[in-house]
Image (spheres, helix red, strand yellow):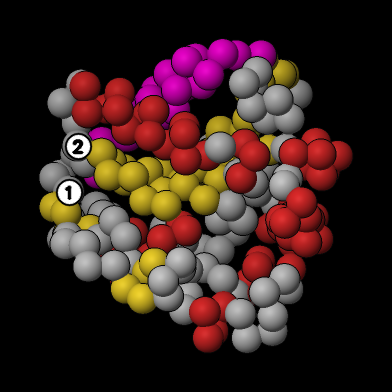
Amino acid sequence: MRVTPVTPDVLVSEVLKLVDDRPGRVRVMLDGPSPTRPGDLAHRVAAELRSRGRAAVVVDTGDYLRPASVRLEYGREDPDEFLDGWLDAGGLRREVLDPAGPDGSGRVLPRLWDAATDRAFRDGYTHLPGDGVVLLHGTVLLGRGLPAELAVHLHMSAAALARRLPEDAQWTLPAHARYESERDPAGNADLLVLSDHPDRPAIQKG
């Protein structure tokens, strides 16, 4: 294995290279526990794509959670449900990933469900052109069979994650441990980023 320390700017460039190598529409999944800040990476990549004249839509999996009546059926701090039952994977496929695919309509809904108010957003659809890019970011995202051209996994060791997760999210640690052992996010990623120190990432290859 070869580990190469990089700056956050270089990491953005590495993701852009992967996108540039793909023709047509590209669906990119940026996966990592919240302390690795996958959303920050998604927005930085999107901004650079737009500056080059390429349409980019950022989608947060936090806006595609199931309603509270389903998501919290077994309580607010059930790690197994956090891993297996919180994400509305069907909604993501229907409203984002399938229409953003090579043969899709390009009609993408950036946000579906507001978990804070437990009701649907009133957002309209966005049309993604033939060379547009969707950047889907979130946690415990890979290994679900969701269709995408590219996947980036921001890996944080168990010890670092335990240190960096806020106290009110410590209950998710068993879910993250299961995710690493059962879903193999590193093996499902096109780009593996070691993110124990998110401001000093490293790319692992080989």
Say above or below: 112 vs 199. Answer: below
Say above or below: 25 vs 123. Answer: above
Across and down, in percent, residue 76 comes to 67, 74
Q: Residues within 10 Å of mark 2 (few under 14, many from 20)?
A: some
* Residue at the spot of label 1: 128
Across and down, in percent, residue 42 comes to 42, 36
Q: Count up the numbered dots.
A: 2
Q: Tag on residue 91?
A: none
| Magenta-span inclusion, residue 133 | no
Q: Type of residue at label 1? A: Leu
Say above or below: 67 vs 199. Answer: below
The C terminus is located in which quarter? top right
Figure quadrant of residue 204: top right
| Magenta-span inclusion, residue 22 | yes
Answer whether residue 27 is visible to the viewer in this image: no
Across and down, in percent, residue 195 comes to 68, 30
Answer whether residue 170 is visible to the viewer in this image: yes
SS under mark 2: loop
* Residue at the spot of label 2: 55
Instruction: Choose the circle earlier in sequence order: 2 or 1.
Output: 2
